[in-house]
Image (cartoon, rainbow, N blue to C red):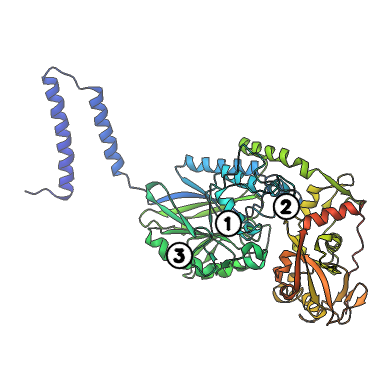
Amino acid sequence: MAITGRGRARWGRAAGLLAAGTAAALALAAGGTVSQAGAATQDAAAQQQAQDKKPKPTHSQIQLLAINDFHGNLEPPTGSSGNINGTPAGGAVYLATHLKQLRAAAAAKGQDSVTVAAGDLIGASPLLSAAFHDEPTVEALNGMGLAAASVGNHEFDEGWHELLRMQTGGCLPDGDGQNNQNSCPDAAHPFEGAKYKYLSANVFFENTRKTLFAPYTIKTFKDGKKVGFIGMTLENTPNIVTKSGVEGLTFKDEVETANALVPELKKKGVESIVVLLHEGGFPADPRAYDSCPGISGPIVDINAGLDPEIDAIISGHTHQGYNCSLPDKDKNPRLVTSASSFGRLVTEVRLSIDNATGDVDRLNTLANNQIVTRDVVPDPKTATLIAKYKELVAPIENKVIGHLTTASVVRTNDDSLESPLGNLIADAQLADPSVVTGGKTPVVAFMNPGGIRADLVSTNGEVTFGKAFTVQPFNNFLVSMDMTGTQIKALLEQQFSGVNGPEAAKFKVLQVAGITYTWNPAAPAGSKVVADSIKIAGQPLVDATTYRIVTNNFLSDGGDGFPAFTTATNKFFGGLDIDAFANYLTAHDPYTPVATDRISVGS
């Protein structure tokens, strides 16, 4: 009779027990004993049989930790940028500790962990990092165990060649700090580059199919589970960075780029796909950092267009904190997160992977935005790194360049959107001798308000280079150029139209010197500047007259939605904007803020 099914299983167990009993009996009959090793072997076999009977887990959990828009904030940020809803937050020494604690908690549960980022880790950085071309920030992130990061627009602040150096390492011949920057200041420890992988799926060399960095990376975890990470910056990057920084590159649509990579990843056995995207959204309540009430902005449309095979979006750029699920094209929930900025939040995601399919089980995938509080023990290795660079930057940072007769000069706008600090910076640019060429001296200066990053603050009246750098951290070059009266009129209207309008919330009023005018908030876009109100050096603007103006190279390339600058002629590059600012403060020591009477509101 054949034995099948349950009968076969019962017979197998019985035969095993019979064989074991017979072996023991024979041993005893021969005058021997049953050894402890033999008993242990039998116990182990029994335990294995019991283990085999247990149902195998249907899911595995992988911890995903994410940050974005760190901007070289090695030291705890201050003011409104240094807290989350009133809780002091940020600082590399605390961020490193929180990441270690989160990983340890995951390891205790038997979970693998990976740390990623969604761009702007460097650029627009405080002097502590910027004075060394952001090498300290890359070193700090190496120590924090970052594995992969998408590029952001600020990664291109010093150009894509410099960004390649951030990845591969090496030193710049920058004159040992002569221009307030110093690559590789510690000769014994040259810059080795990022240990993490930069990703740039939608950044291509012109006329080629080659991307600047790899478009994605695949992480393989225990039991062979794979997660693919696609990294991208916003398609609009060329319009918000200096033209020279992205010369020779093409930036493509985020949705089309990611969707085209899905089949390629699936061919490589990847079912779990995460996008690291330097573009984001705006929750209706910016305090709701762990949810997404009424979220709007580019991330909403991008999510709607992405392939449903993409399981999660780690986003950035808008400096907002949010965490929610938005429906994909198949109406299934998809995780969309952002961790604010400056290292104040960490997004912890528990990716739940279906063991049968290798895909993310979205209904069982959870995320939490955690505040990087400062009540934990500072990470000692990160603290040592920061202390080293603080000592190296001190001679640059602490140099007194002038004095204020007030405690500060603020960037707060009046009703015309003009500010005291904007006037100071525009005056400094207009007075800078480095932009004078061929006997032509600029008569008008224009400064973008987004380039003014902080109030100018004094300490007992003293202004240091470090304080000035906090105001203007981009190291832009000043550019003088010729513009006709007609071109200047078009420029002024672009403050309230195109990407800068027509809603008041989008208005972007340039800070000026040498020019006065009135604009009418009630007038339609394209006609907001009051006719005949524009005066240069006190004289009415003449359409056909050519005027020499000065601005920074970011605006010169048409940045911030000002294409009128691209129509200017006879462009000449001068020195750095921060140098013009510092020199002006020294030349006008002590400085007293002037009235905001250059731009008026009226009809």
The residue that appears at 73% across and 42% down in the rendered structure is: 393
Residue 66 seen in the figure: no
**Upstream in the sequence, badge 3 or badge 1?**
1
Q: Secondary structure at mark 2?
A: helix
The amino acid type, in three-letter code, at marker 3 is Leu
User: Would you say 57 lies left or right of 89 here?
Assistant: left
Estimate how packed mark 2 is, as few (under 14), some (14 to 19) or many (20 or more) residues with alpha carbons within 10 Å. Answer: some
Q: Say which mark, if any, is on residue 118.
A: 1
Q: Say which mark, if any, is on residue 81.
A: 2
The amino acid type, in three-letter code, at marker 1 is Ala
User: Would you say 77 lies left or right of 108 here?
Assistant: right
CA–CA distance between discs 1 and 2?
19 Å
Q: Say which mark, if any, is on residue 261.
A: 3
Estimate how packed mark 1 is, as few (under 14), some (14 to 19) or many (20 or more) residues with alpha carbons within 10 Å. Answer: many
CA–CA distance between discs 3 and 1?
18 Å
Q: Which image quadrant: the C terminus?
A: bottom right
Q: Secondary structure at mark 3?
A: helix
Q: How many marks?
A: 3
Q: From the viewer's perspective, is the residue at label 2 or at label 3 nearer?
A: 3
The residue that appears at 56% across and 51% down in the rendered structure is: 167
CA–CA distance between discs 2 and 3?
36 Å
Which of these two is toward me, 188 or 146?
A: 188
Question: Is the residue 476 above or below the residue 538 in the image?
Answer: above
Q: Is the C-beta separation of discs 2 and 3 under 8 Å?
A: no
Estimate how packed mark 3 is, as few (under 14), some (14 to 19) or many (20 or more) residues with alpha carbons within 10 Å. Answer: some
Which of these two is toward me, 584 or 403?
A: 584
Question: Is the residue 96 above or below the residue 267 in the image?
Answer: above
The x, y position of residue 194, in whole percent, is: 56, 48
Q: From the viewer's perspective, is the residue at label 1 or at label 2 nearer?
A: 1
